[in-house]
Image (spheres, coloured by chain):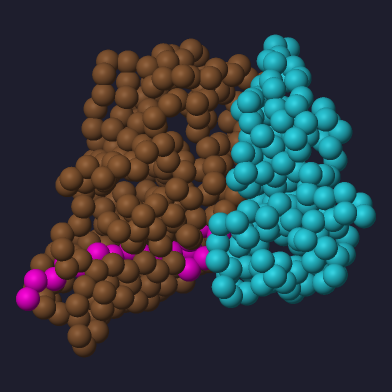
Chain colours: A brown, B cyan
Amino acid sequence: MKPAAFDYVVADSVDAAVAALGRGDAKIIAGGQSLVPMLNFRLLRPSVLVDINRIPGLAFIRDDDTSIKIGALARHHQLETSPVIARHFPVLAEAMRHVAHLAIRNRGTIGGSLSHADPAAELPMMAMLLDAEMHVARTSGTRTVAARDFFRDALSVGLGEEEIVTEIVVPKLPPHTGWGFEEVARRSGDFALAAVAVTLTLSDGTIVQARIAITGVAPTPRRVTSAESMLVGARLDRGVDDDVIESVRAVAEPETDLHASADYRRHLVGVLARRALGAAWRRAA
Amino acid sequence: MSTREISVTVNGTAHRHAVEPRLLLSDFLRHTLGLTGTHVGCEHGVCGACTVLLDGDSVRACLMFAVQADGCRIDTVEGLGQIGALNPLQEAFHAHHALQCGFCTPGMLMTATDLLKKYPLATDDEIREGLSGNLCRCTGYQHIVAAIRTVKDDA
């Protein structure tokens, strides 16, 4: 399995990358951990590959007062081990350990994972959970897209052909926020059959803000806003109401494939939601 | 076919070659440089047999192009030790019978090299999780885990 021939352009700046995207049927290569298999299988045959790995200054993880800013070329392993991420988003650090294997995490980038938007990937789900914003560069300057407007369908995002994600801005969580992350995959490092990530923010012992994101059970990662509203004002010392779990299952739109049936995935996402909510409650309390 | 000149340092030796952009790093190592210790199993990043170190980090050599490695340092299984002078990880694989057919072994060794550097590997479960991206169809992994455990505990 060898890729079809392509022209290769090394971009030394974001502007150069955007300009090179205008050259015919071009494709960006960052970590390449999803792209190169598709090239090897010849599912994709771009005429030009624009390599952004050598653009300086795009691999940062920066504390910016009210938010954390992450450069598009930050690798999964960087997020997994960053003290800044561990301190502000332990849920993200935990999720990164579920992404494939070390050799893939050494190479795969945050910008690449978000732009590729695999329906069972962890990073898009984290972007949804944490209300991240994507900074996008294009020929005529830059624009910002909220995660909720970014993921359109399986492997489909709100990016134009000559646009590139340069940075992700993740607002810091309020104090007294607990988190939970639960995933089931066939084998360690496989894509999730279902995964649930949760944050709960408490005030005076009750929930004032809840966020629930699910992945692997719909064409895109989703927030379960119905369940989130039910949880505001609640306490979870005696477990999670079945209504909440049912509304998580209702938002899932799983498909049957080789790995699991739709029914199993729908059941699973509820089980995982219960566990993740329990963990978040304990951590917040 | 247009080619591009690249310079790479493989196991400490500098090489300069003209490569086609679509040439996978795995094929560059095996066919251009004749370093056939790096094995090729699946060619889509699943089996881990082609794992090498790129500037010290483990990567799948089938998931990048040789042209992308321009200016980089690459370490392959050939650089770990010599016959008669194996490195401690290779010695441990030998002592624990951590290979049978040997096809996955180069990838196992390069992966384990990076795991030992980056993770505490406090439990065997952690070693197993670290090896989950490297397929072995002979050993049942037990001996491989034992070999890595020995190196960790002796370190």
Which residue is found at the position 77% from the left and 61% from the top? B88
Vertical placement of residue A95 versus B152, above or below: above
Quarter of the image where one finds residue A190: bottom right
Asked if residue A25 lies left or right of residue B60, the reply is left
In the image, A1 versus B107, the foreground residue is B107
Percent of width and height locating residue A132: 26, 46
* Residue at x 86%, y 65% (from the top left corner): B94
Work out whether A177 lies above or below A219.
below
Position of residue B30 measured from the top left corner of the image (x, y, whole percent): 82, 35
| Residue A57 percent coordinates (x, y) | 39, 30
Tell me if residue B70 is in the magenta stretch: no
- Image check: B15 left or right of A165? right
Residue A250 in sight from this viewpoint: no
Left or right of B113: which side holds A56?
left
Q: Residue furthest right?
A: B84
Please name whichever residue, A67 or B63, is drawn nearer the observer in this view of the structure. Answer: A67
Q: How many marks?
A: 0
Q: Quadrant of residue A181?
A: bottom left
Q: Is residue A117 above or below residue A50?
A: below
In this picture, which residue range is highlighted in magenta?
A184-204
Q: Is residue A66 visible?
A: yes
Quadrant into which the N terminus of chain A falls: top right
B75 or B29, which is in the foreground? B75
Q: Quadrant of residue B85?
A: bottom right
Say which quadrant the C terminus of chain A sits in: bottom left
Q: Residue furthest bottom?
A: A238
Q: Is residue A190 magenta?
A: yes
The residue located at (30%, 42%) in the rendering is A62
Tell me where residue B96 appears, x and y as whole percent.
82, 72
Q: Residue at x 20, y 85 (%)?
A: A237
